[in-house]
Amino acid sequence: MPANAPMPDLGEVTVPLISFVRPAYRHYFSGLPERPNYRMRRYNFAGIPAFMPLVRAFLDTCAAAKETDYRYLFTLLGSELANNAIRHTLSGQPGDGYSLLVHRHRTGLHLACRDRGGLATKDARLVPKPDGLNLSAESGRGLAMVNAFASEWGDNGNAEFRMVWFYLAYDLTGSQWNTSTDD
């Protein structure tokens, strides 16, 4: 084929996301509490938004032995940390990624998201936007949700290699999730 010939249309291929997971780790994404006594799970994710269903499956599986509200909240908050890593750090650049590390404790789950940082120039702690829970806001709700719904949260303040974490108690102590009253 001559060098200046047009490139033929290659079409599109759909590949199941689970094909990107090594067989030894597939149980991390099953959604089943087949190994409820784990102490720690860690997985490295590519910094591509298309992998978010895998992230949610991983988080949901980590909390699979708990009730629906807890699973939903843990998955929601963890997804926010992963989205922030993709959107606001070098982890979202081509070829980069981030890690999610879940520690199971007797009283709750602790999730740490470790990313490449790099877009901020100075070390500083993260602060949620004051109006972050405003439903009409187009963005900026992630850290505000983590602040409101996690039992505890924080970050290492390092601009180059950021680690943001939260702890969610099984009984949701410290969370605003169950503070509404039914009339």
Image: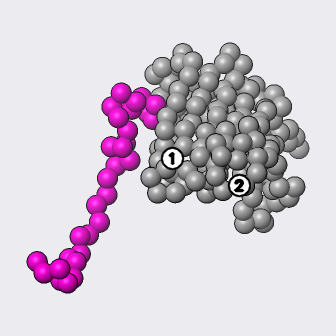
Residue to which mark 1 is pinned: 97
Q: Earlier in the sequence, mark 2 or mark 1?
A: 1
Quadrant in which the N terminus is drawn: bottom left
Residue at the front extreme of this rendering: 121
The overriding secondary structure of the stretch rendered in magenta is: loop
The residue lying toward the viewer, choosing from 173 and 24, is 24
Say if residue 128 shows up in the picture.
yes
Q: CA distance from mark 2 to mark 1?
A: 17 Å
Query: In x, y percent, where is residue 181?
Result: 87, 40
In the shown orientation, is residue 44 left or right of residue 21?
right
Query: Which quarter of the figure has residue 9?
Result: bottom left
Q: Secondary structure at mark 1?
A: strand
Residue flagged by tag 2: what amino acid is it?
A: Ala
Q: Is residue 4 magenta?
A: yes
Task: Say few, some or many: other residues with alpha carbon within 10 Å of mark 1 (under 14 / 14 to 19 / 20 or more).
Answer: many
Q: Is residue 153 magenta?
A: no
Quadrant in which the C terminus is drawn: top right
Query: In x, y percent, where is residue 156?
Result: 73, 37
Q: Residue at x 67, y 28 (%)?
A: 110
Q: Residue at x 78, y 61 (%)?
A: 135
Query: In x, y percent, where is residue 146?
Result: 75, 43
